[in-house]
Amino acid sequence: MNQTLKPIRMEFGRHETFTIRHGWLGKGLERLGSPEGFAADTATADKLGLGSRMVRSLAYWLEASGLADVVMEGRSRRLNMSDIGRVIDANDAYVEYPGTLWFLQLAIASRDGSAPAWFFNDYLERSFERAACVEAFLRYAKQRATKTPTLQSTQRDVANVLASYAYNPTEAQDPEDGTICPLIELRLVTYHRDTRRFEKVRPVDPVPIEAVLAAASSCSNGEETLSVMDLASRRHGPGRLFGLSPEMIDRAAQEGARIYAKSGVTYVLLGAERRLSVPNRPPAWWLERHYRRIERQA
């Protein structure tokens, strides 16, 4: 093991091989807000009409997406609605707005120790075959994980990531297909059927300014200002999490400083480069501002 790298506890297979499915997170939010709360048990599975593995998967995705906080009750895990979960529940209870999905991506891809976090922050290949991706993840996990995974577990985790994000432009998307992961709508990964290769691509639709600012705050590491290249290349930054180019980040930073100047966002020339300063606010704060801005524009 590389001694310069601190071992990390990685979570393998907690998705139970299921991606997020349409309607799942909305059901999960409703259950989180009920008097019974959410526990990955038979009562919750029966109430939501899910199998036992599905309800365990949903519990994981509620946690990974930031919608729920974990509370330990003895040896049992119970989920409580998080701050950002309450914001989403109040404004997008069915979890279907594009802005909401970008904030879910922010949480999922920032969850260190998970396959999505590795895929977006540490796996820098833009075009790749499935087998090469599995090999790279297995190599990373052997170097960093406190517990060495099997080839089969890394194959399942990579398969889950690709099933969650990869968009096949030659395949018509059935809006009634509830098994399709809503994160595919972000169009961050394209599958080329003719070559059987996957490609990380720039997002076609604009990423919400507030999501970019939330990611900038997340990757600042306490620094007051960040350059465009910092934002494009840092782990947990908007370049890695959202696939944004430096030019896209520059435009977003200019717009963010214009809209949120009164909140303390600045984008000024310091020396030879422009640097962004973002107040240290949690993602829930930024998402609330996003909903209010969209509401005013409606």
Image (spheres, rainbow, N blue to C red):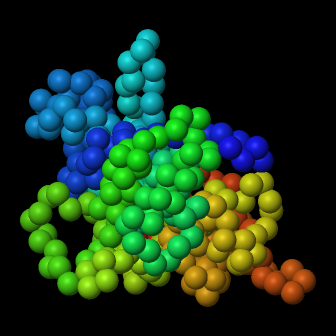
Quarter holding the N terminus is top right
Name the quadrant containing residue 194. bottom left
Residue 62 seen by the camera: no
Name the quadrant containing residue 200. bottom left
Residue at image coords 67%, 59%: 219
Quarter holding the C terminus is bottom left
Q: Is residue 270 above or below residue 90?
A: below
Q: Nearer the viewer, residue 238 or 128?
A: 128
Residue at image coords 57%, 70%: 124
Q: Is residue 45 left or right of residue 298?
A: left
- How far across and how far down the image is residue 28, in percent? 27, 41
Q: Is residue 211 above or below residue 104?
A: below
- How far across and how far down the image is residue 153, in percent? 38, 44
Q: Is residue 152 left or right of residue 258?
A: left
Q: Residue most toward the right? A: 271
Q: Nearer the viewer, residue 29 or 234?
A: 234
